[in-house]
Image (cartoon, rainbow, N blue to C red):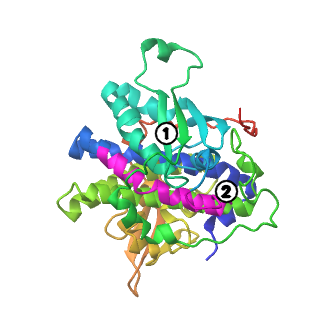
Amino acid sequence: MASRFADLTREELAVVVPELLLMGQLIDRSGMAWCIAAFGREEMLQVAIEEWAAASPIYTRRMQEALGYAPTEPGRGDVVTIFKGLQLDIGAPPQFMDFRYTVHDPWRGEFRLDHCGALMDVEPMGEDYVRGMCHDIEDPTFDATAIASNPHAQVRPIHRPPRSDAERAAEGHPHCAWTVVIDDAFPEPEPVPALAVNAASRAATLELAPIDPADEGLADYAGPLLSDIDFAAFSKSALVRIADEVCLQMHLLDRGFALAVAERTETDAELEKLRRKQLVGVAGIGAERLARALGLLDLADPVAAAVRLLAVHPLLNPAVYVDATLAEDTLVVRPSPAHEDQAWISLCGPGWTGALQAVVRAVDAHLDVEVSPLPEGGGWLGRVVRRTEPAPEADEVAVTRFSTGATFAFQPRRSLPITPV
């Protein structure tokens, strides 16, 4: 099955890919708020650690292989391999998490964050939340991500928040800075148990169409490390593959979230409730950003715009993962690998339409989705309709809107090669 992203132009894809990366970051702006309410701050931190450590090593390797910068010897990647992975990771969306890289040699490097959107989100909540994110969560998850490139890599802070009043007031002061050192003498970090569970999922092993090397533009990221990735330089084929891979990153992270939350809930109903809240928040804000980026808010027919938005939303992608057919005002969903993984789409259907509503209402608050089971069973049909009265914003979307990522604007950047210093 062809990718649904193939229906976009190369120019549209170059805009959509960073939007998808940022949307992945918003998963936790949505989910962790409800985890705090359900389990308290300390358990929320543990959920965040477990979900990222169960997902990022898998999707980092997938992107390495897709874009041709995987180490020639498994597990022997250098710091450039690690930095390229971060540039294509939903944990570090471009500019919102403004990583600046320095390479000393293949085994030593540094990065700093000139802007950290995640810090901007939690700093108003107080020092305990800042320390929880910048110390408790990042210490194990940076190393867990590096496992995918080299298990003997260590990521350690030079400086990091909490920030003083003077640091907050200072112009041009990096929010944090870290060293990355690879040494065979460093012990390998112990993977979280959920990593093996997630690695056996359909999302982890899903085969996507290879990039066409004959397509105009870059077909890989095998060249030098760049200060900022110029997504417009990639071919359409490469951008389609990147978009599908980023959607899989979200599904793998959501699986990590579900596995971590399941350890802390007593019933399937409790787990489902928290997963749905997480999904509605990120689905709604992500849909708003995608709709703006693609100019869908300017279309004369809001129903047609909403269906086009559904077609590029991670809820329904990649196409080989989520079996969905969209035409005119309808959406037909059938059993698929995503249902086997109990992915986001498995939460939707005749019994619950909250996420679908959040997506279409990003175009027009009057829109709704009516869902009914297919006559032959095993799937459902959704129809986008327009109501007379606008619907109020869902609480879950309002909570996620707290993030500065809801309104963050990408800026043009020059893409320059980084050489060892």
Q: Which range of residues does the magenta coloring cover?
A: 46-75
Q: Secondary structure at mark 2?
A: loop
Q: Say which of 78 and 328 sits in front.
A: 78
Residue pointed to by mark 1: 155
Question: What x and y, as percent, mark residue 244?
Answer: 59, 62
Instruction: Kindly report the distance in space between the C-alpha atoms of the residues bearing marks 2 and 1.
Output: 20 Å
Decide if residue 73 is on the left or right side of residue 392: right
Q: Main secondary structure of the magenta part?
A: helix
Question: What x and y, as percent, mark residue 149?
Answer: 55, 53
**Residue ranking furthest to the top:** 166
Question: What x and y, as percent, mark residue 121?
Answer: 43, 32
Residue 364 visible in the current orientation: no
**Residue ranking furthest to the bottom:** 376
Q: Is residue 214 above or below residue 159?
A: below
User: Which quarter of the rendering shows the N terminus?
Assistant: bottom right
Q: Residue, x 53% and y 65% (percent of image)?
A: 317
Crowd tier of the residue under label 2, counting other residues whose Cα lies within 10 Å: few below 14, some 14–19, many 20 or above = many
Q: What amino acid type should be assigned to the residue bearing mark 2?
A: Tyr
Q: What amino acid type should be assigned to the residue bearing mark 1?
A: Val
N-terminal-most mark, 2 or 1: 2
Q: Residue, x 22% and y 46% (percent of image)?
A: 38
Residue pointed to by mark 2: 69
**Residue ranking furthest to the front:** 185
